Image (cartoon, rainbow, N blue to C red):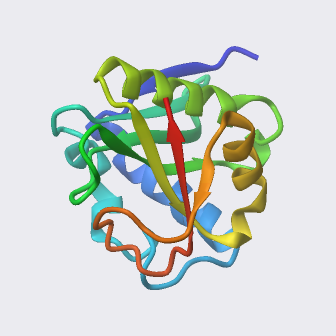
């Protein structure tokens, strides 16, 4: 298996949006207050054109397997970035692809000089939450920043 990790490009927008929404339907989290409804999901390459942000894709033979990125969400404390839009297709799970995407995103955060990574999730994504805990994320009692994703109720922070 030869997996390629690369940054998102405009040509990827449709496939990435479709993958994110497919995973959200699979876990029955396709609801208001999530990226499922967020119109920016349809043009992520544009969203990640800001400074100190990256969105990584994993692919094999041109087939999109997953994505994960970091984004300087408004309202986060100084030196903190958000881990965002972390999704892996069902057929690609359990192969280390999600872990590779997360490691690449953490590397990006360190490259840009961030010292903390924040994330928001949902209890339905318990396997992902387990991975976050393994990497060192700790649960917070409430949200940081202004993501606008009011349906999320799991908040975590990783100190780099």
Q: Quadrant of residue 54?
A: top left
Residue drawn at (27%, 42%) of the image: 45
Q: Position of residue 146 (x, y in %)?
A: 28, 67
Q: Is residue 130 left or right of residue 87?
A: right
Q: Is residue 87 left or right of residue 89?
A: left
Q: Position of residue 50 (x, y in %)?
A: 16, 39
Which residue ends up furthest to the top in the rendered image? 2
Which residue ends up furthest to the left in the rendered image? 50
The one nearer the camera, 36 or 64, is: 36
Q: Quadrant of residue 109?
A: top left
Is residue 144 placed above or below 104 in the rendered structure? below
Residue drawn at (23%, 60%) of the image: 75
The one nearer the camera, 16 or 109, is: 109
Is residue 76 placed above or below 57 in the rendered structure? below
Q: Is residue 116 left or right of residue 10?
A: right
Q: Quadrant of residue 79?
A: top left
Q: Is residue 56 left or right of residue 52?
A: right
């Amino acid at each position: 298996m030869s997996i390629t990790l690369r940054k998102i490009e405009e040509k990827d927008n449709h496939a990435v949006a479709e993958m994110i929404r497919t995973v959200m339907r699979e876990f029955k989290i396709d609801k208001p207050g999530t990226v499922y409804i967020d119109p920016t999901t349809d043009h992520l390459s544009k969203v990640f054109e800001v400074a100190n942000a990256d969105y990584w894709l994993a692919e094999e033979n041109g087939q999109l397997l997953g994505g994960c990125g970091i984004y300087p969400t408004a309202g986060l404390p100084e030196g903190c970035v958000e881990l965002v839009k972390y999704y892996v297709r069902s057929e690609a799970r359990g192969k280390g692809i999600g872990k590779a995407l997360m490691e690449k995103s953490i590397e990006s955060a360190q490259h840009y000089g961030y010292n903390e990574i924040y994330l928001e999730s949902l209890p339905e994504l318990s396997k992902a939450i387990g991975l976050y805990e393994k990497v060192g994320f700790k649960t917070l009692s409430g949200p940081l920043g202004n993501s606008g994703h009011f349906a999320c109720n799991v908040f975590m922070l990783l100190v780099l």
